[in-house]
Amino acid sequence: MTPALRSRLRAALKALVPAPWWAALRQHCYRRLRRRADRRENRRVSRADAPLLVVSESERAAHAYDHWLAWLETARPSLRGAIRLDRVPGATARHARVLHAWVQDPVRERDARLFDALEALEASLRQRGGRILNPAAVLSHSLRDVMMERLATVGMGIRLPVVTRLPLDPDERFTPSVYPVIVRPQWGHGVPMEVLADPEAWRAWRLDPRRDRQPQVLTAFIDVRSPDGLYRKYRYVSFGAQGLPRHLIVSTNWEVRPKDRVVTAATRQEELAFVHGETPYADVLERARVALGFDIAAFDFSYDAQGALVLWEANPYPDLSPPRGAAAGYLEPVVMATYAALADYYEQSLASAVIAAPTCHGCAGSGQALP
């Protein structure tokens, strides 16, 4: 069948099928295609008894760390062979000793069906003594108000923005006590946020019928602008107890995003000094990771005018892909170091996870382990 004929048949069938049914059928077909691609990949490179199970959501077109998997084939082929890919819902633990779900946080609040599937998969592995990295329930600690409550126990000079969870429909009796304030969703990364400068801006936001009805939080605005008028946001990534600086983004905007990165000779040297320099903040960030219960996390922070570390948030599902644009070249060694750190952590996790062997009840001395 030619592509043109296939396209015409698809269009004719789509016209006969109700839109919700068509969307469900389309998603079902894509899930099957993705599972088939995973099986091919597993047959190509993974051991039959691969002990590290990595699962992604069925709706995702690709696994989040595909770029890391490609690097692994050449850099550490034995570890790549120890990894089996699968999708949830529908994955099984089989030979796994370690499970890591490459899924966006949080899960319970975002997708109850996915959460139940992950909980069942984790339970089947725990029963055999396996290890779960960043369990689904723990990912709820990334809710912004919950995160700040847990981080408040860390101390050691961290400055935390005050975060207040908003009622779903705040009325005039609920007003911020200090302005300016940031309003943003309770969870999610890279999501829009808005600064409300005064009571009038708050009232306009509250009454706006177009605003997002997802749970929202108010976050105190902390001005971390440097004397040169630019804003700086640093990232540190931790895999277990092994952490390393990942990048520094300098921007003209208070909402620092990679697309707004200012790259000059001076900012490049400043970023290189950060990613290759001492990490005096490492101890406090590792304590923050433990307080949140995360095995893997990326921390975004800045410094205020007094030099105090302002910790914005922790992301248990960090983007590890190479940066784009001008920073791509000079940060390549840092990307490779991050890849190596994740590989090290997986190898350590596999070494520490010992699945109990089935017992041989017919052997002399009931309970003797099978070889």
Image: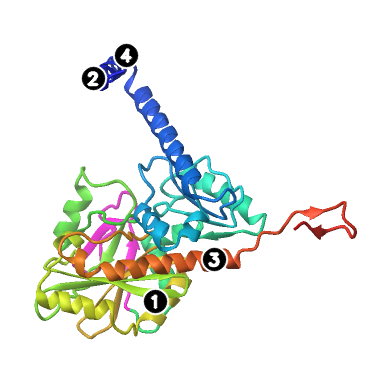
Please give the name of the residue rendered at 61% of the width and 64% of the height, measured from the top-left corner.
353
* Label 3 crowd bin: few (<14), some (14–19), many (20+), radius 10 Å: many
Foreground: disc 3 or disc 2: 2
Mark 2 residue type: Ala
Q: Which residue is mark 1?
A: 285
- Mark nearer the N terminus (2 vs 4): 2
- Mark nearer the N terminus (2 vs 1): 2
Mark 3 residue type: Ser
Please give the name of the residue rendered at 18% of the width and 54% of the height, measured from the top-left corner.
203
Q: Which residue is mark 2?
A: 4
Mark 1 residue type: Leu
Foreground: disc 2 or disc 1: 2
Task: Give SS at disc 4.
Answer: helix
Please give the name of the residue rendered at 16% of the width and 74% of the height, measured from the top-left corner.
268
Q: Is residue 152 visible?
A: no
Task: Give SS at disc 1.
Answer: helix
Residue 233, given in percent of the width and then of the height, sits at 23, 71
Q: Which residue is mark 3?
A: 349
| Residue range corresponding to the magenta coloring | 159-185
Q: Nearer the viewer, residue 312 or 201?
A: 312
Residue 188, given in percent of the width and then of the height, sits at 33, 55
Query: Left or right: where does residue 9 sit relative to residue 198?
Result: right
- Mark nearer the N terminus (3 vs 4): 4
